[in-house]
Image (cartoon, rainbow, N blue to C red):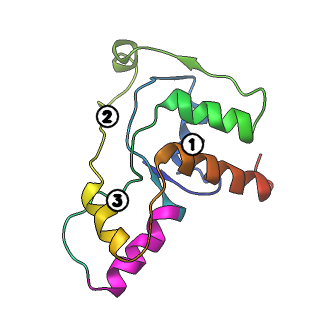
Amino acid sequence: MPVSDDLHPRNFVTKISKYERVVDIPNSNTILTDLLPASVLMAEHGETGIYNFTNPGAISHNEVLSLFRDIIRPGFTWKNFTVEEQAKVIKAGRSNCLLDTTKLENKLKEYGYIVPEIHEAYKRCFERMKAAGVK
């Protein structure tokens, strides 16, 4: 799930903040500000192969929305529903996954680059948004 430092319509945060209800399941997420420089660094060093390009760890929708509320939009509220309730209203099934980033993290450490854990990465992302005046 890609996340940029703005509320672009294709940003994962923009999408879930507009849903009437969300399912609270942890997933891997990609904060683009953290991973795009990593991809350039790896390309510059001629690295190839299969890597899970996500921040380490998993974060739930409620955790994302709580940080969003606390940093960007005080007073923001949302409702949850179950996976079973969700299945009744969506057209296509959803996958939920925690991707192993060990290979990526180890490779990037060789070049002195550390990808922040997803909770810290979201906090930094929302702080950048706030500093830029995003509401």
Between marks 1 and 3 in the image, the one whose residue lies nearer the viewer: 3
Between marks 2 and 3 in the image, the one whose residue lies nearer the viewer: 3
Which residue, given by chain and number where applicable, does mark 2 sit on?
96
Q: Do the residues labelled 1 and 3 touch (CB within 8 Å)?
A: no
Rendered view: 26 above or below 9: above
Q: What residue type is labelled 3?
A: Phe
| Upstream in sequence: badge 2 or badge 3 | 3
Which residue, given by chain and number where applicable, does mark 3 sit on?
53
- Give the left or right position of residue 62, taking residue 107 as reference: right
Q: Would you say residue 18 is visible in this rendering? A: no
Distance (Cα) linking label 1 and label 3: 18 Å
* Circle 2 crowding by C-alpha within 10 Å: few under 14, some 14–19, many from 20: few
User: What label does residue 27 carry, if any?
Assistant: none
Secondary structure mostly seen in magenta is: helix
User: What label does residue 13 carry, if any?
Assistant: 1
In what element is the residue under mark 2? loop
Q: Are marks 2 and 3 in contact (CB under 8 Å)?
A: no
The x and y percentages for residue 10 are 52, 51
Image: magenta residue range: 34-46
Residue at the image position 41 percent from the left and 14 percent from the top: 82
In what element is the residue under mark 3? loop
Quick check: is 39 in the magenta stretch? yes
Q: Which amino acid does label 2 sit on?
A: Asn
